[in-house]
């Protein structure tokens, strides 16, 4: 496991996975790293531009909530869609929630169910519960 200094060195050198881990550390305030949402978004953006679906997922969550950036629910949904289409199960689940609630996307029970089924197919264990809840109305 990298020390915080080694991780920062690798991230600064352009290692996409290190960028992603720097972002997560800054979001969670892990070890000797203080929470800094703005800096976390910058690292997630770098990793997302390098093609990491997990970074795109985290970036989407930040946009949805306005953590470290201006709140942009539609931008968050766009990031989540990119991650989900790349096979990110949690992103598909979150999209179901967005369509169900109308957060950043048109409110649609049908699209929510579609994304929950996609999440389920990708192996997200919480998707079945969401589908059952949605079916009960």
Image (spheres, rainbow, N blue to C red):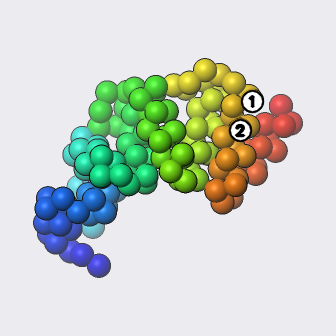
Residue at x-position 58% and y-position 32%:
98
Secondary element under disc 2, as helix, strand or loop, is helix
> Residue 116: percent from the left, percent from the top?
69, 44
Taking the image as drawn, is residue 29 in sight? no
Residue at x-position 70% and y-position 53%:
120
Could you tell me how far apart the alpha carbons at marks 2 and 1 are, in whole angstroms? 6 Å
Callout 2 touching callout 1 (CB < 8 Å):
yes
Q: Is residue 130 left or right of residue 62?
A: right
Residue at x-position 62% and y-position 36%:
97
Front in this rendered view, residue 22 or 113: 113
Is the residue marked by circle 1 packed among few (<14), some (14-19), or many (20+) residues within 10 Å? Answer: few
Q: Residue furthest bottom?
A: 1
Q: What residue is shown with label 1?
A: 110
Question: In the displayed structure, would residue 133 be above or below residue 8?
Answer: above
Figure quadrant of the C terminus:
top right
> Residue 21: percent from the left, percent from the top?
31, 61
> Residue 82: percent from the left, percent from the top?
47, 42
Is the residue marked by circle 2 packed among few (<14), some (14-19), or many (20+) residues within 10 Å? Answer: some
Taking the image as drawn, is residue 108 in sight? yes
Q: What residue is shown with label 2?
A: 114
Figure quadrant of the N terminus:
bottom left
When asked about the image quadrant of residue 52, the answer is: bottom left
User: Which numbered marker is on residue 68?
Assistant: none
When asked about the image quadrant of residue 131, the answer is: top right
Q: Is residue 92 left or right of residue 63?
A: right
> Residue 25: percent from the left, percent from the top?
30, 59
């Amino acid at each position: 496991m990298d020390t915080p200094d080694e991780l920062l060195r690798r991230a600064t050198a352009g290692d996409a996975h290190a960028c992603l881990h720097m972002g997560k550390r800054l979001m969670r305030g892990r070890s000797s790293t203080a929470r800094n949402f703005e800096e976390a978004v910058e690292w997630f953006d770098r990793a997302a531009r390098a093609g990491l679906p997990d970074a795109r997922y985290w970036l989407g969550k930040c946009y949805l909530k306005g953590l470290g950036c201006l709140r942009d629910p539609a931008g968050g949904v766009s990031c989540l869609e990119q991650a989900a289409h790349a096979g990110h199960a949690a992103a598909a689940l979150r999209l179901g929630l967005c369509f169900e609630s109308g957060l950043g996307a048109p409110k649609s029970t049908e699209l929510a169910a579609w994304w929950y089924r996609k999440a389920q197919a990708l192996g997200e264990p919480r998707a079945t519960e969401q589908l059952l809840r949605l079916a009960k109305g």
